[in-house]
Image: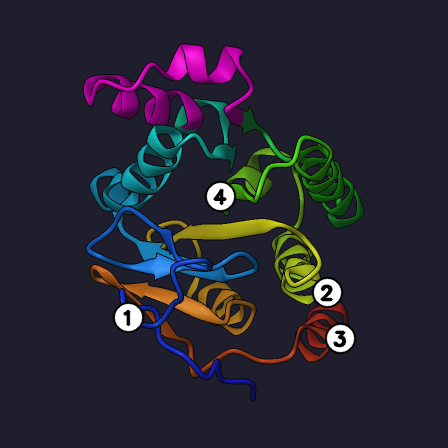
Amino acid sequence: MDTPEHAHTSSARSTHDAIPLGIGGVEAAVGDHIAHFFRGDAQRFSVLGPYIETGLRRGDRCVFISRPDVGEQLCDWLTDRGVDADDARANGRLLLHPGEATEADMKRLADRVDAKARDEDEPFVRWSGDGEWALARDMTVCEMLRWEALYDKHSADWHLLALCQFDLTVFESDVIMDALRTHPYCVMGDVVVPNPFHESPEAVRAELTADE
């Protein structure tokens, strides 16, 4: 089982690497893959909202993979806090995307986002996703989790910082456990901690393929 060597606190990163997440004083780095498990919209937006708001106020490019209605809720949340979500979308600073139909297509999407950022000399992209997007696209849960493991495998290659959310009222416990296995870090309250349940993406993908 792979356990990250560092916890995420304001003192854990150099100034060059540190990226504020928007929750507490927590900072992360390009390549980090963070899971957040929540119950209901209040908990969802208590982490997702500040994460995107902080990025937009800094001038970061932000991507949110979700059902369209959740994306619109995010825009309303941002507007209520004085962030012009419509302008951010029009200027390409905020991309709301419903997700693709297969894990291979999701990888191609991440490749395109990463390539565009590099072409435009962006230091990184603030990537986020809500696991429910896969249900709206008729993707199997196993395939969605294989995508998470595939992202985990390639996270060091992309100039992305990822926050992935899973609603505990939507997904069964076995899905949540598999989601835990695909993320090196987890949000706990207002801190981000190394995830002791993280496993190699190759092992997780093999087991998920066998299960399906």
Q: Earlier in the sequence, mark 1 or mark 3?
A: 1
What residue is disc 2 on? 212
What residue is disc 4 on? 128
Badge 4, how many Cα within 10 Å: few under 14, some, many 20+? many
Badge 3, how many Cα within 10 Å: few under 14, some, many 20+? few
Residue lying at the far bottom of the rendered structure: 1
The alpha-carbon separation of the residues under discs 3 and 4 comes to: 25 Å
Location of residue 203 in the rendering, given as x and y in whole percent from the top left corner: 70, 80
Vertical placement of residue 199 versus 25, above or below:
below
From the image, which quarter does the N terminus lie in? bottom right
Location of residue 27 in the rendering, given as x and y in whole percent from the top left corner: 34, 58
Q: SS at mark 3? A: helix
What residue is disc 1 on? 11
Mark 1 or 3: the one toward you: 1
**Residue at image location 54% in from the left, 38% down from the top:** 133
Q: SS at mark 2? A: loop
Q: Is the image coloured rainbow, by chain, by secondary structure, or in one colour?
A: rainbow
Judged by its main secondary structure, the magenta piece is helix
The alpha-carbon separation of the residues under discs 1 and 3 comes to: 37 Å
Q: Is residue 26 magenta?
A: no
